[in-house]
Each structure stands twice: as structure tokens, then as C-alpha cells.
Image (cartoon, rainbow, N blue to C red):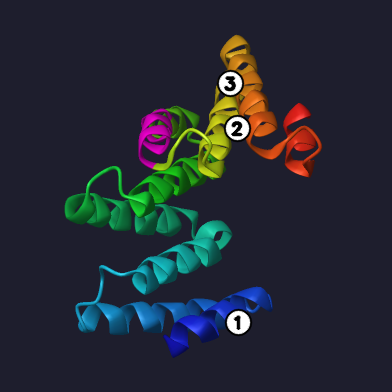
Amino acid sequence: AALLQLGSVNLRSDDATAAESHLREALAIKRRLGETDDRIYSSLVNDLALVLRAKAPQEALQLFQQHHADLVARHGELHDGSITLLANIGSQQMRLFDYPAARETLERALPLARRGLGESHPLVSVLLSNLALTERRLGHHDRAALLQREDLALSVKVQGPRHPDVGISWL
């Protein structure tokens, strides 16, 4: 837990090299101890993938994918961590400009998020927004507009029309 905290402090202070080192060390310890099925391990994987996102994007994607497969095997697709990781996989695929793969992943994640987390969960809005952006990048402008309108309606319903995130949805 101390290495996780140290890695997180380094991450917040923009010392990505130190954060990566501490997070890798903490992950190695958790793996040696066989403690790969808890929130701390999930936080370590997520934080390391965030550090690697720009520097080693393919490695970040693989971390998300491996941990997602582990969580699904242990807890099923509707586990909140599994759904979040699937959303992270889609986002990382977008960063890698692999829009067909991102669309497939995000389309898989959206109904799981609705079913597992509830229609009003913020991740549903994030998935709608990312799927709309992906569709736009693929040249499917009509579908993108429909998804953006759905995201906006959900954001207004959940957060109210004056919330700053709702304003961003209009853009």
C-alpha cells in the first residue's frame, strides 16, 4: 500500500519516471504475494497504465486488457471494475487511432454499463461521448449526432442543465 501511495504522489507531482518505477515495484510485490484480486491491485494497474498511456501506449492497452480478462474470469462482465476497464480499453484504442476496435469495445461496454451500473451512472455518459467521437472519426456523422444527443439528454437528466459537464456536451 505504501508503494501505491508513493506512486500516486509521484503521479500527482508529474514525476512520471518515479511513479512508473514505484507502481511497477508495487505490482510485482502484489503478484508475488498472489494478491491480484483486490482494489489496490486494480488501482496499481490503472495508475501504471495512465503513466504509460503516452510513453508506451501499447503496453498500457495490454495492461488494461490483461486485467480486464482477469476480472471477467473472476467476477463476470457486470463487475464494476470489469466495465470500467472495458471503457479504459476503448479510450486507449481511441488514443492509438484504432477507431474500429474502439467502436467494437465501446459498443460492448455501453450495454454492460447500463445494466451493471445503471442508466444514470457517469460512465454511461462517458461511453456515449467516446462512442460519438469514434463514430465521427469513422465518418459516421449521423450516428455520432444521435449518440451526442443521447449523451446530452442523459447529462441534463442526471446532472441538471446548469452543470459544467452539460455545457461541454453541447460542444
Q: Is residue 83 above or below residue 9?
A: above
Rendered view: 158 above or below 48: above
Q: Looking at the magenta stretch, what is its main secondary structure? A: helix
* Residue 87 on image: x %, y %: 45, 43
Q: Position of residue 105 (x, y in %)?
A: 39, 34
Question: Are the residues tagged 3 and 1 within 8 Å (C-beta)?
Answer: no
The three-letter amino acid code for the residue at tag 1 is Val
Residue shown at 30% from the left, 43% from the top: 78
Residue topped by disc 2: 129
- Look at the image and give the residue range highlighted in magenta: 107-116
Residue 147's label in the rendered image is 3
Q: Amino acid at mark 3?
A: Leu
In the picture, measured across the screen, residue 159 lies left or right of residue 93, that is right
Quick one: label 3, few (<14), some, or many (20+) residues within 10 Å?
many
Residue drawn at x 55%, y 77% as measured from the top left: 8
Whole-angstrom CA distance, mark 3 to mark 1, is 37 Å
- Answer with the quarter of the image where residue 147 lies: top right
Residue indicated by mark 1: 9
- Labels 1 and 2: the sequence-earlier one: 1
Between disc 3 and disc 1, whose residue precedes? 1
